[in-house]
Amino acid sequence: MDRTFYIMGALLAALGVAAGAFGAHALRARLAPEMLTVFETGVRYHLIHALALLSVAWAAARWPGHATHAAGWLFLAGILLFSGSLYALSLSGIRALGVITPLGGAAFIAGWLALAWAVWRG
């Protein structure tokens, strides 16, 4: 499982850098400033949690168990729900997509708590 989280973390980090470049170069002239800020927030959390997946991969090798794996899957869910909803909201302007964002935030928080639990119990 640690290999899976390393691969996902690395690929998602690459995707996050690409999204950041896309926002900085292609979207700056196309999005309203507040929507560009929303997009940039998605990128920031995306990149932070791609790195978090790398830390889960390391933790899975050192403290394997259900909590470590849960942390990885929660971080992945958080990226998809939190950052994904912010990307979709900023690009489409459909404000209703914002109701998904807190679910991703909750997944991020749960992921950090699961990671802490895994290390504490390990």
Image: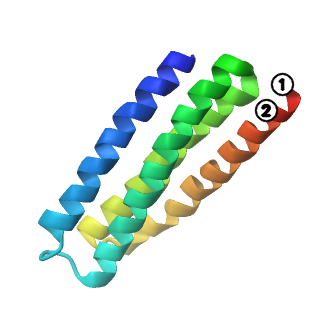
Quadrant containing the N terminus in the rendered view? top right
Q: Disc 2 on helix, strand or loop?
A: helix
Which quadrant holds residue 95? Answer: bottom left
At horizontal 17% and vertical 68% (from top left) the residue drawn is 27
Asked if residue 39 lies left or right of residue 66, the reply is left
Q: Residues within 10 Å of mark 2 (few under 14, many from 20)?
A: some
Residue denoted by label 1: 122
Which quadrant holds residue 41? Answer: bottom left
Q: Can you tell which mark lies on residue 14?
A: none
Q: Residues within 10 Å of mark 1 (few under 14, many from 20)?
A: few
At horizontal 31% and vertical 76% (from top left) the residue drawn is 35
Asked if residue 67 lies left or right of residue 58, the reply is right
Kind of residue sitting beneath label 1: Gly
Scheme of colours in the image: rainbow
The residue positioned farthest toward the right in the image shown: 121
What is the x, y in percent for residue 2?
A: 56, 19
Where is 80 relative to 99, above or below?
above
Cα–Cα gap, marks 2 and 1: 5 Å
Asked if residue 25 lies left or right of residue 42, the reply is left
Where is 4 relative to 27, above or below?
above
Kind of residue sitting beneath label 2: Val
**Depth check: 21 or 32 in front?**
21
What is the x, y in percent for residue 90?
A: 30, 69
What is the x, y in percent for residue 26?
A: 12, 64
Residue denoted by label 2: 119
Quadrant containing the C terminus in the rendered view? top right
